[in-house]
Amino acid sequence: MAPKFLDKVWNEKRSLMLTDALVFVIAAGCAAACVSGPRIVRYVVHERPLTVSGPAVGAALLVIGYLCAALAFWMLYDLHRLLLRLKKGEVFVAGNVTSLRHISWCCALAAVLSLLTGVVIYPPYTVIAVAAGFMALIVRAVKNAFAQAVAMKNELDYTV
């Protein structure tokens, strides 16, 4: 349990602000990785033991990397929108369910891309695939809980 003085210093509003700031930091890191994509791929192709070789491997890794980056940007955008709604006190609303659904699909698609890359080109990518798949399951469970809460809230709103 956290010390009592932290309750006065740290609160839900600050937590949401920190999370939203980290979304932008991660987006900047993702953008930097996109700019450095060709250099990263050259390093992986020349310095790492790949399952396959040839001129198309680098291009395939770059395309897969950019596809995963697009998914990451989409996920971060939806996470930012979710956080904005939470800051406004909009917790159990349909928009949050939609954002969580998008986030889970982004994680699931990244898991599939990473698994294919791991199996065909570079086996360590399978670790990323497992992590992304696990994250997709967690976000999906939270999305389902939010969907039920939204349905219950809507039902209660019409009951009054």
Image: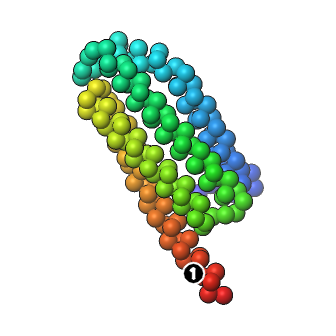
Colour scheme of the picture: rainbow
Q: Is residue 87 above or below residue 68?
A: below
Q: Amino acid at mark 1?
A: Glu
Specify whether 159 is left or right of 37.
Answer: right
Residue 147 in percent (x, y) is at 51, 67
Specify whether 34 is left or right of 55.
Answer: right
**Viewer-proximal residue among 21 and 109:** 109
Residue 138: in sight, yes or no?
A: yes
Q: Say which element carries label 1.
A: helix
Q: Residue at x 30, y 26 (%)?
A: 122
Specify whether 62 is left or right of 20.
Answer: left
- Which residue is at the far top? 46
Residue 138 in percent (x, y) is at 43, 55
Residue 101 in percent (x, y) is at 48, 56
Q: What residue did someone put label 1 on?
A: 155
**Viewer-proximal residue among 1 and 151:** 151
Q: Can you say which quadrant of the picture contains the C terminus?
A: bottom right
Q: Residue at x 59, y 35 (%)?
A: 27
Classify 10 Å Cα crowding around label 1: few (below 14), some (14-19), many (20 and above). Answer: few
The quarter of the picture where residue 131 lies is: top left
**Viewer-proximal residue among 101 and 86:** 101
Specify whether 128 is left or right of 50.
Answer: right
Q: Residue at x 74, y 51 (%)?
A: 9
Residue 102 in percent (x, y) is at 50, 52
- Which residue is at the far right? 8
